[in-house]
Image (cartoon, coloured by chain):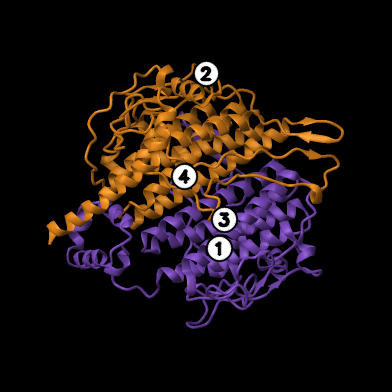
Amino acid sequence: MATSETQQLDEVIVSSRRKMLALGGAALAGLAFAGVKLADAQATPAYSDSDILNFALNLEYLESQFYTLATAGKTIDQVGIGIGAGTAATGGGSVVTKSGGPSACLVPWTIPAIQAYATETAQEERNHVSFLRGALGASAVAQPNLDLYNSFNTLANAAGIANSFDPFANDETFLIGAYIFEDVGVTAYSGAAPLITTPAYLSAAAGILAVEAYHAGLVRTSIFGLDPTGSLGLQGYTQKISATRMALDGSTTVDDIGVGFQTVSTEPTGTTLGASTIVDAQTGSPNYSKTYSRTTTQVLQIVTGNPNVVASGTKYSGVFFPNGLNGLFS
Amino acid sequence: MEKKLVGLIDKALSRRSFLAASGATAAATVIAGCGGSSSTPTPTPTTTPAPTAYTDVDYLNFALNLEYLEAEFYLRAATGSGLSSADAGGNSTVVIAPPTTQVPNLTTTQANYIYEIAQNELDHVRFLRSALGSEAVSRPVIDLLNSFNTAASAAGIGSSFNPFASYEAFLVGAFVFEDVGVTAYHGAAGLLTSKAYLAAAASILAVEAYHAGEVRTLLIADSVATATVTSSMVTPNNTYVGYANKISALRAMLGGGNETALTPLPPYSLPFDPTAYTPASSIVAADSTNSIAYARTTDQVLHIVYAAAPGAGVFQGGFFPNGLNGNIKVTNS
């Protein structure tokens, strides 16, 4: 793209932004294809697109480590994914696993479909790490220290599930472990998307948001399929986890519902039916089946298990991120 | 200054039209004539309209048309009744559907799934109508009968297909819509100027992706539930997975690629040994390198819902025999 054309556009946008907005969506779409950064024309916020992508990268490191350990018994750097700062393959933080190390995390699968789903998801989360690192280039943050052992015990305790919880023990506990991450990924990308100013990054974020929602739908459907009446207790676990996430993020309204049942009112008016809650969104007025979004602070509160607002300049740390996240949003 | 701006934007827009056109060209010859068995006459292409600058209202109304379609499909599958007059913006238009649409012989669990999705799509209609207020378009004429027969024929499934005939047929019908919804909202998200609308669109996009993940998971689960089982081997029954993949291939032809076929679950030995098994699935529809879900232009979505080969000037067909309501209804390429 010709630099002069880009500069010309920036200049024009600054001086007649109102007129451009009046031209509507297609004008902005045209600019998107021209590769222009709209951010250049706006007041500089306290963060950049890179900061938002790095925040997402921290979460993708976490997810990809979980799934790769479960399906390969290895960490992502052991299968060739870079975890260092910038383009460096090495130099990232460590991962706390159950005793026995990564190989002990390989789930002894008994359900072929769940093994297949987990393997697919692991690949996709690794692809997200690679994509974000590629997009960020030299700006990519290193993997922070991660904890995939004590974290689950702490959360299970806080949620009232058990004193300890091993998501790598079997197909069912793996699904519960996956459940902890996926809906949070959806709400995190949903909250971050409108903050992104570069159209290409916005489109990528929306595309990753969709994939996280595919995963969430996959995980929640699999849990409901294994425990369709709730008698196995899996539904109950998800409801406790959702309640814990809601308590951690400080939301005063419902922003998380577990896998279970609900009554819906469809057409013709007055018809009530017993339905599942595969989608993590309340039906009916006023939410109208839209998923929730979380601010970066709310996501930090969940992944670090810290409901309190930390002092300015202090990192949120704990649970999955024992030393906090890397990057501005930490 | 304004003239200069418009000139630059025109340049950018012509680039966009070119990009949209190039992706679709290859498919054009393959699908030619696929509308032959349709009861709807193939529209005669008119002259290529100039690219129009659409507003947020136009994009939300475009989405509302798609939600009307999804809501009619799921509500009828759930209860046999479609949108009420109040939710359809009046009752002057018709929905063409088989005489019986409530899916028969559902287990409680299967019904749970269908009722939830029906409520979600009804909610999306209500939300968009409320957000658009007096600018909301009413429900266009919707065809859930000939459209599926035509699609089944074009996809090579058979001469007819009733998505309300059984649970499995319903899943294939749902498969027709959900991944398209994801790509449509993804494509539109980047075009919205209002951050509030963008946030809402992202949230609906997510729900469509939950549904798509759910439907694809249920198709695979059903292939296992109906598998051929011997003392030493389980071979999933991929009849309906196969139908879904034929639909996926048809959508790819009409909608500029942007598809990931469902990978059947590989057969497995009994007793099951996970270390000797090569698991494979593709529940997520996304590009295989970056695992980012696809986006479609409004043009690509129109070609899918009109069941029409790439080309400019198409304004009706398929699920919308009289076209969409609103400003986005004629294909540009």
Q: Quadrant of residue A278?
A: top right
- Check disc 2 and give the amino acid type: Ser
Give how far across and how far down residue A49 sits, in percent: 41, 68
- Check disc 3 and give the amino acid type: Asp
Q: Is disc 4 in the same subunit as disc 3?
A: no
Label 1 vs 3, first from the N-terminus: 1
Q: Quadrant of residue B219?
A: top right
Q: Nearer the viewer, mark 1 or mark 2?
A: 1
What's the distance in space between the residues labelled 1 and 3, CA to CA? 21 Å
Q: Is residue B88 among the parts visible in the rendering?
A: yes
Label for residue A130? 1
Residue located beneath label 4 in the image = B182
- Check disc 1 and give the amino acid type: Ser
What's the distance in space between the residues labelled 2 and 3, CA to CA? 39 Å
Q: Is residue A102 left or right of residue A299?
A: right
Q: How many marks?
A: 4
Pointers 2 and 3 in contact (CB under 8 A)? Answer: no
Residue located beneath label 2 in the image = B160
What's the distance in space between the residues labelled 1 and 4, CA to CA? 23 Å
Label for residue A183? 3
